[in-house]
Image: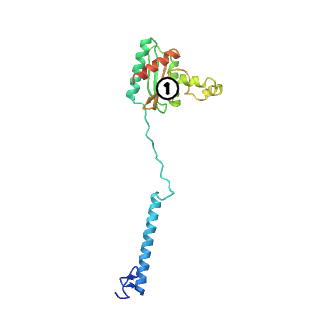
Amino acid sequence: MTTGTPVLLGSSEEGFIPDSGATRHTRFGALRLAGAAGAALVTGAALSGTAHGQTQRPEVAVAKQGVSLAAAQALIAAAEAKAREIGVPMAICIVDESGVLKAFARMDGNSLASVELVQAKAFTSAAFRAPTHILAERNAGDPTRVASLPNFPNVTFLGGGYPISSGGVVVGGIGVGGGSAQQDQEVAEAALASLQ
């Protein structure tokens, strides 16, 4: 091998080969190329957001579970059947997991006041993830909390509101009204049992 031959590593089988000007330029070019490739890798990783210390973009949406229209209608039918059985016309409201109206029925002979009350019962049970009569019991000793209720127009502790659950997840609420608190609860419980 001659000394003028470009060698990147500056060695040969016979040992060290002294640099010529051409070899020095070739080594410099190789180092520049390697440096540029390294810089491109670092820049690419930083721009993709995967470099160490970078946070990933958060999920924009989450999947929610809600009561289906078919289930809401089945709940209303079961509640109406139980209300007829006990001889008390009821208003029945089903809301989704966010407390938004999904289905509603008001039986003939039910009072007008029940229309708003059952919606509040359904909303409260879905929002608090508990039956309204249980919320009343839990808060009976807290007059401050009870006094704050008028500040929340869709919240009530009147019996007859129950959360609707599926697989341990609250997917909505049912509100029933038109009878006594005990009758309202009985009708709501019968409706929920129909989905079991």
Q: How is the image coloured?
A: rainbow
| Location of residue 27 in the rendering, given as x and y in whole percent from the top left corner | 42, 79
Residue located at (42% from left, 13% from top): 84
Residue located at (64% from left, 26% from top): 142
Q: Residue furthest top?
A: 87
| Location of residue 26 in the rendering, given as x and y in whole percent from the top left corner | 40, 81
The residue lying toward the viewer, choosing from 184 and 112, is 184
Q: Quadrant of residue 30?
A: bottom left
| Location of residue 143 in the rendering, given as x and y in whole percent from the top left corner | 65, 25
The residue lying toward the viewer, choosing from 138 and 147, is 138
Q: Which residue is mark 1?
A: 122
Which quadrant would the C terminus be assigned to in this image? top left
Residue 62 at least partly seen: yes
Badge 1 amino acid: Ala
Which quadrant would the N terminus be assigned to in this image? bottom left
Residue 177 at least partly seen: no
Q: Residue furthest right?
A: 144
SS at badge 1: helix
Residues packed near mark 1 inside 10 Å, few (<14), some (14 to 19) or many (20 plus)? many
| Location of residue 7 in the rendering, given as x and y in whole percent from the top left corner | 38, 82
